[in-house]
Amino acid sequence: PCFMFSHSTHALNFSPGIQSKVLKSSRRQWIGKTSAIVVVSLGPIKAADSFENATPMAKLYADKPKRRGPQPKDLGVLQREKSSYDVDDEEMLPALKTCKSAPNCFSTTGDPEFDVGSMLQPWRPPKGYSPADTARDLEAAVRSYEPGQSGIDGAGFSVVACGVPTAQAAPGESFYLYAQFESLKQGYVDDLEFAVVPAERGSSSSSGSEGGQAVQVLLRSSSRVGYLDYNVNAKRLKFLSSKLRVQGWTAPTIDKKSHTDYFLENAQV
C-alpha cells in the first residue's frame, strides 16, 4: 500500500533514500488559493535483480548482462523553469522533469511550441473527485499493469515510492507515485511518475468534491538508456490511460496523430 501524508508535519513518510519537503509557489493559477505542495526528492534506489511480477520468459534472460542505466537524480515534483527555451522567462513552476530531445519520453512539463513530440496534457479525474479519490484510481491502475502487454516490460515493474493524502490532509497537498519498468531481454529500466496537484483555474475540472479544489495529474514516462524507445513509453501510457478512461477520466491516448514525430522516428528501425 501507499505511504501516508502527515498533515501535522507536511511531510511524506517514505522509505529510506526518499526525502520530501513543502514548497510555496507564487503562481496562483497553478495551485489556486492553497499554496502548499509536497516536493519529492528521490535519493538513489538500487534496482532489484528482477521484479517479482516478471513474465515467465524473464527466467530465460536472468543471466544475461543488463543495461538498466543510472536513475535520474532530479525526479519528483520540483521547482522548474516554465520554459527552457526562453532565457528571459525566469518563472518557476512546481513540475516533473522535462524530456530531452530523444523520442523516448513523454512528460506534462515542457514548451508547447518546441516539445510537441513529447509533451502531454495533464490527465484529469472525473468531476467531483478529491485528491484521495484521484490517488486511489492512479495507484490501482498502475498496480494492475500487466507485464508483457503489447510485447513490453516483460521483466516486470515495481512501485518504488507512493504517497497518499489522509482524510485530514490540507487542500493542495499532492500525491506522488514513482514506478520502474524493466524490459525483457536487455534489462532497460524506464521511470514512470505521477503527481496529483490542484488544477489550473478555467480547466474543464472546475470543481472538486463538495466544492473543494479540483485536481489534475502530472505524468512522465521515460527511458534511461538509448535514443529510440521502440514505442515502449507510448504503449505503457496507452495501457494506463485506457484503464482510467473506463472510469470516466480525461486521459487522452498517445497515437500517430497526437505525437507524429515520436512515431515517425521510432518507425525508422
Image (spheres, rainbow, N blue to C red):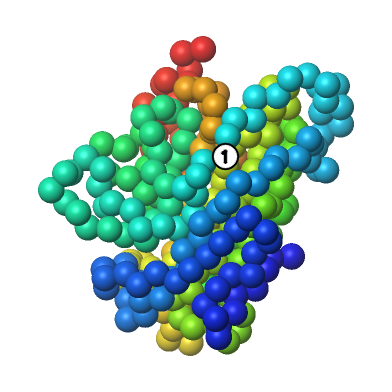
Please tell me which residue lies in front, 256 or 66. 66
Q: Compared to 200, does 266 lie above or below?
A: above
Q: How many marks?
A: 1
Quadrant position of residue 59: top right
Quadrant location, the N terminus? bottom right
Which of the 4 quarters of the picture holds residue 189?
Answer: top right
Dot 1 amino acid type: Gln
- Judged left or right of residue 210, residue 2 is right
Q: Is residue 216 left or right of residue 232?
A: left
Q: Is residue 212 visible?
A: yes
Q: Which residue is mark 1?
A: 71
Measuring from the top left, give residue 9's x and y in whole percent: 55, 81
Question: Is residue 136 among what the camera can see?
Answer: no
Q: Extreme top residue here? A: 269
Residue count near mark 1 (Cα–Cα under 10 Å), binned few <14, some 14–19, many ≥20? some
Q: Residue at x 64, y 70 (%)?
A: 13
